[in-house]
Image (spheres, coloured by chain):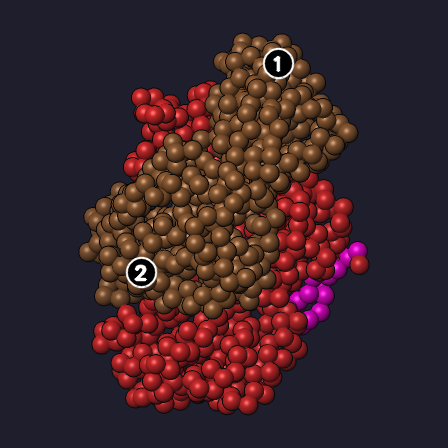
Chain colours: A red, B brown
Amino acid sequence: MTEFRSIVAATGEPHGDPLVVSTPADVEAACAAAAAAFDTYRATDRETRAAFLERIADEILAIGDSLIEAYMAESGLPRARGEGERGRTMGQLRMFADVVRKGQWQQLRIDPALPERAPLPRPDLRLRMIPVGPVAVFGASNFPLAFSTAGGDTASALAAGCPVVVKGHPAHPLTGALVAAAISKAVKDAGLPEGVFQHLVGPSNELGAALVQNLNIMAVGFTGSRGGGLALARLAQARDVPIPVYAEMSSINPVLLLPEALKARGEALGTAFVGSLTMGAGQFCTNPGLILAIEGEGLDAFVAAATTGVSEAKRQTMLTTGIAAAYAKGVETLSALPGIEKLAEGEIGSTTCGGAVLFQTTGAKFLADKAMGDEVFGASSIIVRCKDEAELLQVLEGLEGQLTATLHMDAADEATASHLLPVLERKVGRILANGWPTGVEVTHAMVHGGPFPATSDPRSTSVGSLAIDRFLRPVSYQNLAQGVLPPELRDDAFGDGAPRLMDGTLTLN
Amino acid sequence: MTEFRSIVAATGEPHGDPLVVSTPADVEAACAAAAAAFDTYRATDRETRAAFLERIADEILAIGDSLIEAYMAESGLPRARGEGERGRTMGQLRMFADVVRKGQWQQLRIDPALPERAPLPRPDLRLRMIPVGPVAVFGASNFPLAFSTAGGDTASALAAGCPVVVKGHPAHPLTGALVAAAISKAVKDAGLPEGVFQHLVGPSNELGAALVQNLNIMAVGFTGSRGGGLALARLAQARDVPIPVYAEMSSINPVLLLPEALKARGEALGTAFVGSLTMGAGQFCTNPGLILAIEGEGLDAFVAAATTGVSEAKRQTMLTTGIAAAYAKGVETLSALPGIEKLAEGEIGSTTCGGAVLFQTTGAKFLADKAMGDEVFGASSIIVRCKDEAELLQVLEGLEGQLTATLHMDAADEATASHLLPVLERKVGRILANGWPTGVEVTHAMVHGGPFPATSDPRSTSVGSLAIDRFLRPVSYQNLAQGVLPPELRDDAFGDGAPRLMDGTLTLN
């Protein structure tokens, strides 16, 4: 296949001109250009790199409304979501600009020489983080802006000093092309080599595989399905030089309704839950796919309100017909499990739309059937009624790794929450109270990550400023002359605003 | 096999009583106990954990001279080295105690709530690092103390809050047992669960494989051969839940003799080089196995001095007869390569001893035969004569990842060094000037790591305080009540001495 088409999500029909599929030669050329640009790009000073990131944000805004129109057509998502996501995309580029300027990411460490030390003098040792090299980024279907071409992976990799080769998601090629052109314009206007950012497109898995296997690529960022993420991780491990894959894959995001909160506001929680479940047709990594509660006062009110809410829910356009079909199949698989009861179903889905579904089971039955713990990407959720706290703990211990866990709790639930906390910490990347997991702030203290299979690497996050650490590695310099040292490690750089660990003691600049 | 023996390195003969080999049931029990101890151990406060690490150091010293005697017999290394290594082992435990107390490793981050933010309020978000879980540590053959039972991997994992299960190296079981008993005494005296530290022994690879495959193990630290490290990494990746393996594997540590330094002191460099090459029978990960120089004044003087030095070198006891045999085979393989010339050979080795060997080749021939770049663990090195700087750069670009690169340089070489630096940064973890790579300081700015295959994971170091980061992962807490938050993230913990990133700005306590 040499061409493919952009599809209107709402109709499943192609629109616009045919698009040229990137070839293996394009992959090769892009990765070679990225490698050639690496030393130049990583040598940029903090201000230059920060200003470049801000310039990208400006260029994305400058695309204007054609970007939002392409976004809406290709994703089926509404204007407000598109504009919000554009703001988020620009916001995270600017946040990384701020992070780059402040310089903490460099992790500068200086251990001065101790010439008088016996029996041997200590050499002068200085450490900084350097970028790992060209990064391959796979755009996500469900965030055509914030997790795609100029999304969090791209922003954090560029912030780290890594050239980026994006494999755009085939579900939004027009959106991707507009953003890619904006980034390339920023690259050019900043006087940087073209290889700093490149964009490949096409519907085949082979394209992505070739990218991950290219030996110039040194790390991979991915948001998508478990199957896709694991396949890329396997390819990355099988290379002559294995590389890290940061794949954000699957999560059912348990929500725990603690007894006192349930007693106090079971009905209100049920209504609010449906709002989170059905938002964006349930197409969030952090969608609440599992409700855990102990039998008791308020649970019936929660279930009743949730049942009503789901029954009344309208079907919604899904991102692609493929996702709609996979969602329908996932719901069918769950429905057929012997231990599960379908509580409610909203408007029935179609080839382009997904309808909300709510199931119920018991703790014992959930424990007996691993299949109930599989992610169904869309507005489907299971309420698990546990007979007591011991069973609830057992269900938690049996869960796979998750992005989030949510506690609905009152002050009188604090002892229970404290008891659960160590288990939750071992299972998830973010623990939240009295809210809903959908809605991921782009801040410094955010973790959008978690134990396998929520991600392929729980040592990191794909959202928030900590994401930059994924693309850095330490290098130590011993007894190097001032003139040869990297500028930020020279004596005359002290006071440049970046914190330093001086002989083990943190100093602010 | 249910028993095995400790071997005297100098004679290849067994000594002491037969030792019981750990069984699969022992592995299972140790990992289960480690998992059971995890939540208790990681809940210890910084002072408790720091004091525990210091207690281990004290207990190791308290073993007394029997430790040094076992060390000398089992390793063939001299008393001064044993005492030095004991000091280093205690020193790194104390360094990690200091690191734990200072608290920077927690990477605390706090983004206060913004209740007035439009369109949606920002929640309160707080982040800390938590330990990953039980860690498997594989003792190294060449550092029976500093990289083994209570070595850097164990010290950094315990500092992070991870229980440790050590698979002791079968080349020094008596040394390992003494150290293990000292650690277990410290565990008991500190009132911690026994599962915080456990020790398994035996000569088979199956024992280590079972340990890495045990699902209670969440990370692996290893120092040893490339074959061993890659095998463990493959096992770790094939698990239902893959885990990171930090394997420090192989490196030939290029030493670059820049023209002006060579002109000024070729002979002195040649003599000093032989000192580094033959130290400890060459059994260092950072042994200088590759000398790179451009043809010109001083190179002949260097070669002459190195040739004399190696010719006069006495053979030395190697750590095991297996290592001595592998060294002899590696030298034989190198000798048989068509493009290589044997310049000098010291006293001939034996079944227990290794003799020093020096080879020479040209840049073109080195580039033509990948086999010249393979590590030969012992006192063997190759001088590569490059015809010009372009060829030298080509040789560098063709090298695999390394732990170190060394520059011998004078002020007039600075421009050349600056030109080479970006290439070296991409290839190695530590760049040093006018010294020798053997000798790895345990400090904050040390990196003992590097791109594959020097290690399996270049994002880290196995020596120095940064090593603690290998065993941590971030967790975010959103809108949690003060009473449920981990103590260090509560408002009343501000000022506890640990630095915090407050809304993106670093504050010292």
Disc 2 on helix, strand or loop? helix
Q: Where is residue B317 in the image (x, y as percent from the top left)?
A: 52, 34
Residue that numbered label 2 is attached to: B41
Chain containing mark 1: B
Asked if residue B97 can be seen in this view, the reply is: no
Note whether A439 is above or below A50 in the view shown.
below
Magenta range: A2-17
The one nearer the camera, B11 or A308, is B11
User: What number is the disc on residue B304?
Assistant: 1
- Residue at image point 56% right, 13% down: B266
Q: What element carries label 1?
A: helix
Q: How crowded is mark 2: few (under 14 residues within 10 Å), some or many (20 or more)?
A: many
Compared with B68, B80 (above or below) is: above
Residue B120 image-quadrant placement: bottom left
Query: What kind of secondary structure does the magenta stretch mostly adopt?
Result: strand
Residue B257 is covered by the magenta coloring: no
Percent across and percent down for residue B58 are 26, 45
Q: Which of marks 1 and 2 is in front?
A: 1
- Residue A131: x percent and y percent? 52, 40
**Residue nearer the viewer, A498 or A423:** A423
Quadrant location of the C terminus of chain A? top left
The quarter of the picture where residue B232 lies is bottom right
Residue found 50% across the figure and 38% down from its top: B10
What is the three-letter code of the residue carrying label 2?
A: Tyr
Closest to the observer: B178 or A311? B178
